[in-house]
Image (cartoon, grey):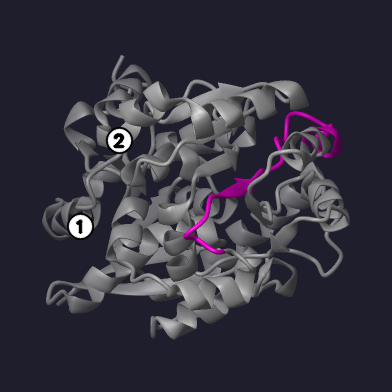
């Protein structure tokens, strides 16, 4: 009998990482999967990205809504969504009875499934624990690690942190970041497709901006206004992608839509790979700048506190929220020949595009003896 793996996806950020893993599960003679889709995937406001999942011909076991039609853009709404996810996933898991839950990262629906799995004595394997995230993601990620039984981490830095947190060393496996796999495996769009849809000529220089709210800071609108001010007088093509739906996102979206820049709700993975791989620079506070941009040797200006403490590749330059500093750092990345030369041959510390294969092998061979679900801190 095949070992059944349970996965839940809430938004584009986790789906891009799960995608190459699910593809390999589909091909496996030893594994099967249940996929539950929720959250932003079901919202038109964020691009109704369940359509992208359907295009992959992935079987969707169940969907449920995490958020009300009227999103209040605050911490209470995030907590409400988490509560709904816990309730709904407990019902689904009780019925489906998977052998193992594959959770990931620092996203609410994945936190929910991790909590539920731990309470229902279902082994949980967590992808990319041990990293420093910033914002509420920092607490979510480490909480997930404490509820999880196995850890598929991106690098030794994360492994050491989990050991310090009292996790069992033999249950921590360094596999890399599967989002790199997803990008490397994806095809690219043509110049014509990109120009027609986004107005970007990727034969010329262009900038991508992705700036999410920081839930522990209440001035998201001021932060994004400073970034937009910094971009205003930089003579380069610009494309801005909507933030996630964490508290403060509505303020950011409002300012983005008032700007005169090209703004898009979402990109499918093919579009994002094409645009990222050809970009002159990535700006903002997305984890994509930390995890993925180094694979394509793309300069990154990381703004503010959201990624503070995270292991950063050499292509990442950090900036405060001040417009003058953001502009200065962008121009440095675009024009400093020494910096540009330095990052041409960098190695991405988050993986080499083979993470998914490593994860699949672990999912097949892990000992799922029920004794694993009784956790105890190691010190």
Residue bearing the label numbered 2: 344
At horizontal 55% and vertical 38% (from top left) the residue drawn is: 140
Highlighted magenta segment, given as a residue range: 201-223
Between marks 2 and 1, how big is the CA–CA gap?
A: 35 Å
Q: Is residue 33 above or below residue 152?
A: below
Magenta stretch containing residue 262, yes or no? Answer: no
Measuring from the top left, give residue 256's x and y in whole percent: 80, 52
Measuring from the top left, give residue 84's x and y in whole percent: 67, 61
Q: Say which of 299 and 107 sits in front.
A: 299
Q: Earlier in the sequence, mark 2 or mark 1?
A: 2
Q: Callout 1 environment at 10 Å: few (<14), some (14 to 19), or many (20+)?
A: many
Q: Is residue 184 above or below residue 140?
A: below
Q: Say which of 46 and 165 sits in front.
A: 46
Q: Say which of 280 and 178 sits in front.
A: 280
Helix, strand or loop at mark 1? helix
Task: Give left or right: position of 92 versus 48.
Answer: left
At horizontal 41% and vertical 64% (from top left) the residue drawn is: 7
Quadrant of res 41? bottom right
Principal SS element in the magenta part?
A: loop
At horizontal 50% and vertical 63% (from top left) the residue drawn is: 9
Task: Give left or right: position of 266 versus 220.
Answer: left
Q: Say which of 279 and 355 sits in front.
A: 279
Task: Give left or right: position of 217 versus 185.
Answer: right
């Amino acid at each position: 009998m095949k070992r059944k793996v349970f996965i839940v996806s809430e938004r584009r950020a986790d789906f891009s990482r799960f995608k190459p893993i699910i593809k390999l599960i589909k091909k496996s003679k030893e594994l099967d999967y249940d996929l539950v889709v929720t959250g932003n995937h079901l919202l038109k406001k964020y691009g109704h990205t369940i359509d992208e999942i359907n295009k992959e011909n992935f079987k969707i076991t169940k969907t449920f809504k995490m958020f009300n039609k009227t999103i209040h853009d605050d911490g209470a709404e995030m907590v409400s969504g988490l509560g709904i996810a816990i309730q709904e996933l407990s019902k689904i898991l009780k019925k489906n009875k998977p052998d193992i839950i594959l959770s990931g990262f620092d996203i609410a629906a994945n936190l929910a499934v991790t909590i539920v799995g731990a309470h229902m004595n279902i082994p949980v394997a967590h992808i990319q624990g041990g990293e420093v995230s910033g914002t509420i993601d920092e607490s979510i990620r480490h909480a997930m690690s404490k509820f999880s039984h196995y850890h598929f981490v991106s690098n030794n830095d994360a492994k050491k942190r989990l050991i310090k947190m009292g996790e069992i060393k033999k249950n921590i496996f360094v596999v890399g970041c599967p989002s790199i796999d997803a990008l490397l495996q994806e095809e690219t769009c043509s110049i014509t497709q990109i120009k027609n849809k986004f107005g970007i000529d990727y034969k010329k220089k262009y900038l991508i901006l992705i700036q999410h709210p920081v839930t522990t800071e209440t001035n998201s609108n001021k932060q994004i206004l400073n970034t937009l001010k910094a971009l205003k007088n930089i003579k380069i093509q610009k494309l801005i992608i909507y933030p996630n739906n964490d508290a403060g996102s509505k303020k950011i979206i409002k300012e983005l839509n008032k700007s005169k820049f090209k703004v898009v709700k979402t990109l499918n993975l093919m579009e994002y790979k094409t645009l990222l791989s050809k970009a002159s620079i990535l700006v903002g506070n997305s984890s994509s700048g930390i995890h993925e941009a180094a694979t394509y040797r793309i300069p990154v200006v990381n703004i503010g506190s959201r990624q503070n403490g995270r292991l950063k590749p050499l292509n990442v330059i950090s900036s405060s929220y001040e417009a003058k500093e953001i502009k200065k750092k962008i121009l440095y990345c675009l024009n400093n020949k020494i910096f540009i030369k330095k990052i041409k041959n960098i190695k991405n510390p988050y993986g080499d595009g083979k993470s998914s294969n490593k994860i699949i092998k672990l999912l097949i061979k892990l000992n799922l003896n029920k004794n694993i679900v009784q956790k105890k801190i190691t010190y």
